[in-house]
Image: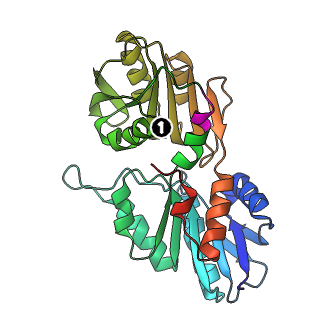
Amino acid sequence: MVDVKLFSGTNSRYLAERIADYYGQGLGDQTVLKFSDGEMQPIINESVRGAYVFLIQSTFAPAENLMELLLTIDTVRRASAGYITAVIPFYGYARQDRKDKPRVPISAKLIANLLQAAGANRIMTMDFHADQIQGFFDIPVDHLKSEAIYMPYLQDQSMENVIFASPDVGGVKRARTYAKYFKTDLVICDKYRKKANEVAGMTVIGEVKGRDVILMDDIVDTAGTLCKAADALMEKGAKSVQAFCTHPVLSGNAYENIEKSALTQLVVTDTLPVKQKSAKIKVLSTAKLFARAIRNTHEHRSISALFVEE
């Protein structure tokens, strides 16, 4: 069978090492030279000729993370790798997936073009901001779902009084998946914004009085939406509110907002590094899921078999 080589970007090594441990193989030998002006040069210090190469790097800020991934893809392509998979636990710029106003870019599509132009044969990621982003690629995309991590976790918790909620209209499908699986109800928090990263108002659609509410979302950035949703739900009589969000961007005053909020707990994954410790934030690892997906890809087995059936 063709050799498998795992490599990590500089700022995703914390996760790549765990993935490699679950896979049962060490990370490949790689260095990244940096010139005095910040220009970088990835160097692969071992042969990858004909190998299945998996490059693990989330494309969160700063933009150098994306640039490093693109350069590394080009490096292994020119080194005659047999098949190149970009493993991108967090796909940056995914929120810019359409023209919602005049004269703005569709950045998620541009990133897809860049990855393909660099030489990626396949993309593996988790919880796109919108499922339709898969259509931006002309190469296979393995879209892993955090449901494979969150559902088993929730099954070990008391679910007798639980109701699921979406913090906005766009996330209804995600929340409905959990409500359907656990045979419970769904409510919606309808928000409106005056500008980006600032929620002006929130309306709760549905009955939450006396219920333990679980908010489901894909990204928590400043946590403004989640915190306002939690406050609105508590005002409507909810017994408690916790949130499950896949990607902990946690920028700006996010940690302060979470600490001061009505949220009892925020559960996230490690697709991004959590920079500050908080008693309210719990991190579940994606490493085992990504390791199994990498193995299934290499062995030409099903990826969907890794997820909990609805």
Is any part of residue 209 visible from this angle?
Answer: yes
Residue 74 image position (x, y, % from top left): 58, 79
> Is 156 within the magenta?
yes
Looking at the picture, tell me which residue is in the foreground, 232 or 64: 232
Observer-nearest residue: 163 or 7? 163
Snapshot quadrant of residue 80 = bottom right
Q: Residue at label 1?
A: 221
Q: Quadrant of the N terminus?
A: bottom right
Residue at 37% from the left image edge and 31% from the top image edge:
167
Say left or right for 236 vs 141: left
Tell me the crowding category of disc 1: few under 14, some 14 to 19, or many 20 or more residues within 10 angstroms, Cα based. some
Question: Residue placed at 53% from the left, 26% from the top?
Answer: 159
Towards the viewer: 98 or 216 = 216
Please say whether residue 37 is visible from this viewpoint.
no
User: Which amino acid, mark 1?
Assistant: Asp
Count of numbered labels shown in the rendering: 1
Residue 252, given in percent of the width and then of the height, sits at 50, 33
Quick check: 122 above or below 23? below
Location of residue 55 by image quarter: bottom right
For the record, the magenta segment spans: 153-157
Q: Residue at x 42, y 11 (%)?
A: 210
Residue 259: name its quadrant. top right
Please state if 200 lies on the left or on the right of 253 as rendered: left
Q: Describe residue 249's horizontal placement relative to residue 277 as left or right.
A: left
Q: Main secondary structure of the magenta part?
A: helix
Above or below, 230 relative to 95: above
How far across and how far down the image is residue 268, in percent?
A: 58, 38
Locate residue 114, reporting x and y percent: 44, 72
